[in-house]
Amino acid sequence: MTTTSATPLLEVEGLKTSFKTSRGIVKSVDDVSFVIPAGTTLGVVGESGSGKSVTSLSIMRLVARGGGSIDDGVIRLNKPGQPAIDIRNLDEKSMRRVRGNDIAMIFQEPMTSLDPVWSIGDQIIEAVRLHQKVSRAEAREKAIEMLRLVGIPAPESRVDDFPHQLSGGMRQRVMIAIALSCRPALLIADEPTTALDVTIQAQILNLIRRLQKEIGMSVLFITHNLGVVAEIADRVAVMYAGQVVEEGPVRAIFSAPRHPYTVGLLKSIPTPGSSSNPMASRKLDTIGGAPPDPVALPHGCRFAPRCPLAIDECQKAPPPLFPVGENHGARCIRWPEVSK
Amino acid sequence: MVGVVMFAIIIFIAVFGRLLWPVDPLRVDILGSLLPPSLEHPMGTDDVGRDVFARFIQGAQVSIGVAIGVTIAGTLIGGTLGLLAGLVGGWFDTIVSRTMDAILAFPPLILAMAVAIGLGPGIVSAALGVILAAIPWYFRLLRSEVLRLRTLMYVESAQALGASSFRLIRLHILPQTTSTIFIQASSVFSFSILTLAALGFVGLGIQPPTPEWGTMITEGLAYALTGQWWLGFFPGLGIFMLAVSANLIADRLRDIYDPKSGARLSL
């Protein structure tokens, strides 16, 4: 599945995004770097407030409305056969052309992501006609075709339905149809399955994977569900308190994690029967403590206060990202001792 | 339905009344003064023998005309300011919001009276006074609607699709505020009918001899105790019907503009 080309589709280097709040400046994303090769999926995991969503909104340059600003870093989009696009320094008009057309986004709340006053067909038509010069009739044809592609039955009649006439899973399919209507090079999926029940989750994941193959796009998949990541991602970035603490191929992250936080996350996945089986040997592990206060981050390693392996050394300086394997990095000074 | 019928009757009288009842509302007939309602004078005659029905018709035209003007002006000015304050925020929002709070500190009728007195009694100053009193209501409603709507996911996802700010307002924020605007507009409509009548009643509105419902009630008041009830009753009925029907229509409009009730719009 992984197609390695010389230049990856998306390069993010040293991204820093902060928000001004009444309590002080919150560095939601602090020095985040990753690349997404064309046609591959990067899974970003982490708990609430770790900076996953802000990272994706920074790539879309949609942080200003929430009072945030991108302070530093490079976000570069390399479409094959075209000059690289420097997203941070793009003017607003060109940025609008990138949004939806080159990079599309689906949000975690399918119930509120569709405008209740327009039919779903109108909303797909809007997306198509924002970026392509086609007539309304052609756009409508396209909308029906997209609805069929995402598996909505009887799309010819469904196209005139309003969002409140659809279930949550159907709405998320419509969101995906809207996002993919302009065949974006990169799809950012911000917890697209969180609000859905488990059977629908599996359907949506399969849908994204199938469409990814058909269209050949890259996916940035944000989730706090490691099971989902194992299923869909080629590479994984684990975020904690605004930083990537471990990044690597999905197999390496799951079989040989090199950061205590990743280990903690893996241990806190419930396995079937783990709570009801009286013979179960262990209770479900949790990571003790709470994420650090974003306006008063620890000086050294940000995970140190919760880390079972923490030593005095950890408090002294922020650890760099150590290369711990092939295309695999971990932000932990004791990484050789970390094991599952 | 009741509201629409009542409203339609008044509008019909205002628009076609002069054609169907071509009596000069200003023609004085001292010998035929204070006649009770009859076929010749359906609403009777007043103290100088003017036909009350003819005066009622012209009063309807004046009241409705001014009320429509006030409602449109209030919607445009207050609505635009509220929209901008909600979207732009910052110092603009602060300055306009505090100004509106200051205006709201005055009871609306007192404010309208103050403006009418300050600019000299007359139809224009009365209308300006009512507009000024109506603006803060629109402003506050629209501002809070915009603040609420812009945080909704679908506004953000439309932005993520590359929609411009203008497009976001036009397609995803304004349509959501139509019901609010309509409900507010109809209540401002009945408020301005009542306030204009009140200003006329105390002599600050339209000046005699132009017939206006409020002024007509004042003139009729003197005769209410002596039994000539028709002088004040019919203009009062007109005010009542117009104000009530406007509110009933507002309720109906809210149902129509609810996307869940099945009414269609097209993008």
Image (cartoon, coloured by chain):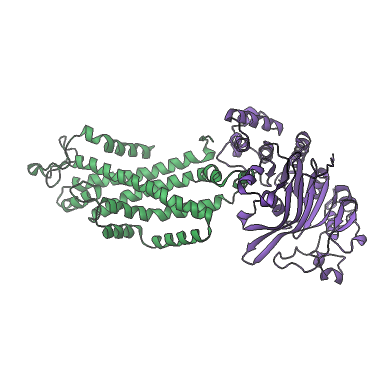
Chain colours: A purple, B green
Residue B57, relative to residue A55: is it above or below?
above
- Whether residue A34 appears in this view of the structure is yes
Residue visible at 53% across and 39% down in the picture:
B259
Question: In the current view of this chain or complex, which residue is farthest to the right?
Answer: A337
Report the front residue among B261 and A173.
A173
- Horizontally, is A44 left or right of A181 in the view? right
The reply, left or right, for residue A106 in relation to residue B190 is right
The image position of residue A142, as x and y in percent, is 65, 30
Residue depicted at 12% across the width and 45% down the height: B34
Residue A192 appears in the picture as rendered: no
Query: Which of the pair B73/B242 is nearer the observer?
Result: B73
Please tell me how many numbered marks the rendered image carries. Answer: 0
Task: Give the image location of residue A166, x and y in percent.
Answer: 63, 37
How far across and how far down the image is residue A304, in percent? 82, 66
Using residue A271 as the reference point, say whether residue A123 is left or right of it: left
Image coordinates for residue A22, horizontal then vertical, percent: 61, 66
Question: In what quadrant of the picture does the N terminus of chain B appear?
Answer: top left
What is the residue that sits farthest to the left in this orientation?
B31
Residue in front for this viewpoint, B147 or B55:
B147
Q: Quadrant of residue A307?
A: bottom right
Residue B189 in the image: above or below residue B136: above
- Quadrant of the image for the C terminus of chain B? top right
